[in-house]
Image (tube, rainbow, N blue to C red):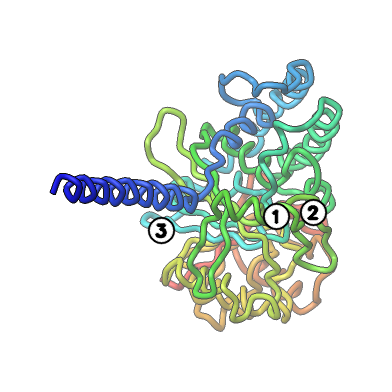
Amino acid sequence: MNSDRTMDVSHLMRAAILAIVGLVATTTRARAEDPREFAADAKAMYRVVACAGTDALPTGVDVAIVGKHCATIEPWFAELAGHYLAPAEQFLATVRPANLPTTVVYPFGGGDLLSALVTYPDAAEITTISLEHAGDPTRLGAATAKQLKRDLGTYRSAVKELFDHHDSASVNMQKLERGAVPGQLAFFITALAALGYEPVGLRFFTIEPGGTLHYLTATEIAAAATQTAKRKRRSWVDTDFSVAFTNSELTFRKLGGTRTIVHRHIAADLSDPALAGSPLLAYLDARGPKIAAMTKAASYLLWLGSFSTIRQYLLDHLAWMISDSTGIPPRYARRAGLVQTTYGRFTGSYLGANATDNAAFRTLWQKQPRRQLAFRYGYPDTDGNRHLLITAPAP
């Protein structure tokens, strides 16, 4: 009997131990499948690249290089506030309707979280879409002094255009697809610094066929480490970082605040063959029946027949849209029952674009009262005139 009891107890102990081991293993697997969080990397970029916050520099980062970098860009923030932030915020507050959707969609919005936040300060969710990948935030801490100095210099040459013109040339965006300072994330985090926000989280994701998001785990990111992110369009450039860092979700809040805003950047080709029927289009449809929209400095792609899918998405879903002349041409807006209101002056497209829509835009501006515009919003026109367009449903 004692022997049997001993065996029974032994079996029970073994079963209990196996159960505990199984629970630990299951918990470990569950934890391994949690999304990988890069908040610390975002905060390091906030300190090193955007020169914001009071955190100590990350270990190994050259103090002298960062000091010289920050001494160069810090005056730019004050200049930006004077010639863009102040007049734009004042103007937009007078034209932006109350009770707009808090979900914002910004096609062709590479790097320009700054204008999205200036335009829609009450946004809860912002999606920017462009050909540029978000970028690998872990490279900053691993960069040598030589790499850091070089790549901060590349970043400065690109971000200066953002500060001066509130958008960025494609050639600068292409340069930042490589190196220790990921261009898109660097621009997004610089926008936070300029407007008094701070990052609180950063994750990366893929889009499932039905439009839902899958946030990448540490295991998935490690498995993709040797798979380099490739260009989204033939005319663009390949990156030198992992495909895992294609789409980002940055969460942030006002300094001292509690309301969290979500910004997602998606690297994608928005032409019809790539977008029609895609997971991205399903994701956009899931943003709701109505969204706040914007676009600017978009190379007049919305004028083209080959971008009809994204144009139709905007026509179907916009509750209110702001743009420069690269927005929706009058012929499409009119058919959709939308009204367009002009500001500034327009005499012709900044880049070469079709004559029909150029003439329609000239007529649109000529038929309306001259409304002043005190800041540049996207491209100037062919004569250097500032201009802006609001597209909205008829009252």
Mark 1 element type: loop
Q: Where does label 1 land, which residue?
A: 133
Q: Position of residue 344 (x, y in %)?
A: 66, 54
Q: Is residue 39 above or below residue 48?
A: below
From the viewer's perspective, tell me whether residue 367 is left or right of residue 167. Answer: left
Q: Earlier in the sequence, mark 1 or mark 3?
A: 3
Q: Residue at x 38, y 46 (%)?
A: 24
Q: Residue at x 82, y 61 (%)?
A: 236
Which label sits on residue 100?
A: 3
Q: Where does label 2 land, which residue?
A: 239
Q: Nearer the viewer, mark 2 or mark 3?
A: 2
Q: Nearer the viewer, mark 1 or mark 3?
A: 1
Proximity of marks 1 and 2: CB atoms separated by less than 8 Å: yes
> What's the CA distance linking mark 2 and mark 3?
37 Å
> Camera-side residue: 260 or 143?
143
Q: Amino acid at mark 2?
A: Thr
